[in-house]
């Protein structure tokens, strides 16, 4: 996912009213000695489990988090709905190779694909398809086959450590300003590439295939199962599974020497169309000054289904909830309201946070723009002009996001807003001994602060130790509670609570960039790259 890049504001010295040492000590005591963050994370991951948007498990998570916010004394705990699409869940699945010998394969149904309605048995054909041009060579060859649509490739050498904490040198390299880039031709190409799944599904159906399989993009018997055809009336035509890389390559080798292996697929999945609204969960600690606006922290509650959604993003959700519990337990009465958000639909395209932006902050484009849905909405939303602020546009004084696993907070990205950097340095001072040391000018993308940035709101993401998030757990079948780090999460929730209280009590709101306007093309002399 890619954020829209706003121009950085010129540096303006703004006094930040840092909280007194007594409040900081109370936050640290509550967050370190009375923490409930791991209890919360364990319930989300072990008890509720994976939380695909609009799935039955996500509905349970929505109700449980609302109840916890209310139990902890937050006010106006509520759900805000937005149009999304179908619910989908897995009751059971099995993929076996039945010839030339029987092997149970590591595999998972691809999200939003239909069930097999019993056992599907058919021979495979290896027919890699990455572009629409690839269809021609497979016409007339797929009838009655389970089609392996990915290139098998080769096993990858694991030359980098799978578990990592940032060094001081690593952190310092993050402090760089990212120049804006506006390339409409590249944006259009990216959209076409991401809609290829729809074209491939139509081709497979027309050619009489009975199912398809993709290769996992990580070795180590990890599977993921992401799929993006979640819109009502646009579900995939046939069952699809993602197969572990090692198993997939074995199938491809056997097919190469012939005869092609046969697979037996049982995909017990089901759709739920009872409520096609996704829901964000919101709760407040009311501020003393109704005219001062609010500050906000958020993480996405939804997850993929291969694992339990522990590091992505049960960890961030638990830290958001724990910061709320800490501040509520302290009985704080901040100047500004402090709002806590658990987003839905993030994994499919940040749809929950887009909905919040449109309802509370700003809209994009003109009334004559075509209506877009699904992935098209995600890829085109921040390319629409002009930006029209809502009446509450300036009420949001700061937004802080957590969505990079359970690693310790090591700093914060200023998101190309250097005017905020000195203020963050002051707020971090009490936590340097906990490892919170770096303010990085760089921007980050791929999660729920992105579209807040794109309309000029002050949205920020924290720097976290990577641990094994990118290498192992992100979206994978290994995304379970065992990969969470309790000391890191206690530290993160405590620091988040302090940042929120600082932002809520600051004499002036954090400096914000100007309202973005349509940018010039960065390189007007570039020729667009071919889709080939």
Image (cartoon, grey):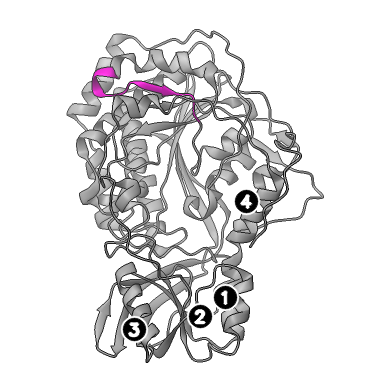
Distance from the alpha carbon under mark 4 to that under mark 2? 26 Å
Asked if residue 275 is positioned above or below residue 424 in the image, the reply reads: below
Distance from the alpha carbon under mark 4 to that under mark 3? 39 Å
Q: Left or right: 361 with respect to 121?
A: right
Label 3 packing within 10 angstroms: few (<14), some (14-19), many (20+): some
Counting residues from the start of the chain, the first of labels 4 and 1 encountered is 1
Q: Which residue is denoted by mark 4 in the rendering?
A: 379
Q: Residue at x 50, y 78 (%)?
A: 127
Q: Residue at x 57, y 40 (%)?
A: 3
Q: Where does the magenta region start and end?
A: 432-442
Picture coordinates of residue 78 (x, y %)? Answer: 47, 44
Asked if residue 479 is positioned above or below residue 333 in the image, the reply reads: below
Is residue 238 something that shows in the picture?
A: yes
Distance from the alpha carbon under mark 1 to that under mark 2? 8 Å
User: Marks 1 and 3: which is nearer the front?
Assistant: 3
User: Marks 1 and 2: which is nearer the front?
Assistant: 1
Q: Which residue is denoted by mark 2 in the rendering?
A: 238
Q: Residue furthest left?
A: 33
Q: Residue at x 36, y 86 (%)?
A: 257
Counting residues from the start of the chain, the first of labels 4 and 3 encountered is 3
Q: Which mark is residue 201?
A: 1
Q: Which residue is denoted by mark 3 in the rendering?
A: 254
Q: Are marks 1 and 2 in contact (CB under 8 Å)?
A: yes
């Amino acid at each position: 996912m890619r954020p829209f890049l706003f121009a950085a504001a010129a540096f303006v010295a703004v006094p930040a009213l840092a909280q007194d040492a007594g409040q900081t000590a109370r936050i640290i005591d509550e967050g370190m000695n009375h923490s409930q963050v791991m209890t919360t994370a364990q319930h989300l991951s072990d008890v509720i489990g994976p939380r695909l948007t609009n799935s039955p498990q996500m509905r349970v998570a929505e109700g449980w988090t609302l109840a916890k916010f209310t139990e902890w004394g937050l006010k106006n705990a509520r759900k805000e709905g937005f149009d999304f699409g179908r619910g989908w869940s897995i009751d059971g699945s099995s993929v076996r190779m039945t010839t030339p010998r029987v092997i149970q394969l590591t595999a998972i149904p691809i999200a939003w694909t239909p069930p097999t309605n019993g056992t599907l048995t058919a021979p495979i054909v290896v027919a890699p398809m990455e572009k629409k041009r690839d269809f021609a060579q497979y016409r007339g060859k797929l009838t009655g086959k389970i089609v392996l649509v990915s290139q098998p490739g080769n096993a990858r050498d694991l030359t980098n450590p799978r578990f990592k904490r940032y060094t001081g040198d690593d952190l310092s390299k993050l402090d760089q300003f990212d120049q804006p880039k506006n390339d409409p031709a590249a944006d259009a190409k990216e959209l076409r590439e991401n809609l290829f799944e729809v074209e491939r599904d139509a081709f497979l159906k027309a050619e009489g295939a009975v199912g398809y399989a993709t290769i996992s993009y990580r070795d180590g018997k990890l599977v993921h199962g992401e799929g993006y055809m979640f819109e009502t009336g646009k579900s995939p035509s046939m069952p699809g599974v993602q197969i572990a890389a090692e198993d997939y390559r074995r199938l491809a080798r056997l097919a190469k020497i012939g005869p092609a292996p046969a697979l037996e697929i049982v995909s017990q999945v089901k759709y739920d169309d009872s409520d096609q609204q996704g829901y964000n969960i919101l709760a407040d600690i009311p501020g003393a000054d109704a005219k001062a606006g609010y500050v906000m922290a958020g993480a996405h509650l939804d997850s993929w289904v291969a694992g339990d959604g522990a590091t992505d993003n049960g960890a961030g959700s638990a830290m958001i909830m724990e910061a709320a519990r800490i501040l509520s337990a302290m009985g704080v009465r901040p100047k500004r309201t402090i709002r806590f958000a658990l987003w839905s639909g993030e994994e499919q395209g940040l749809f929950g946070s887009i909905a919040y932006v449109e309802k509370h902050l700003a809209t994009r484009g003109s009334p004559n723009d075509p209506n877009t849905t699904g992935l098209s909405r995600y890829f085109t939303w921040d390319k629409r002009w002009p930006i029209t602020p809502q009446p509450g546009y300036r009420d949001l004084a700061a937004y802080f996001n957590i969505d990079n696993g359970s690693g310790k907070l090591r700093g914060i990205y200023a998101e190309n807003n250097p005017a905020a950097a000195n203020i963050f340095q002051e707020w971090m001072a009490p936590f340097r001994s906990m490892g919170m040391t770096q303010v990085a000018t760089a921007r980050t993308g791929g999660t729920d602060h992105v579209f807040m940035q794109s309309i000029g709101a002050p949205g920020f993401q924290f720097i976290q130790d990577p641990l094994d998030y990118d290498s192992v757990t992100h979206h994978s079948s290994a995304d379970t509670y065992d990969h969470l780090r309790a000391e890191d999460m206690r530290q993160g929730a405590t620091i988040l609570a302090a940042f929120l209280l600082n932002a809520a009590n600051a004499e002036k709101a954090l400096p914000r960039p100007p309202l973005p306007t349509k940018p010039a093309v960065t390189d007007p002399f570039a020729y667009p790259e071919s889709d080939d």
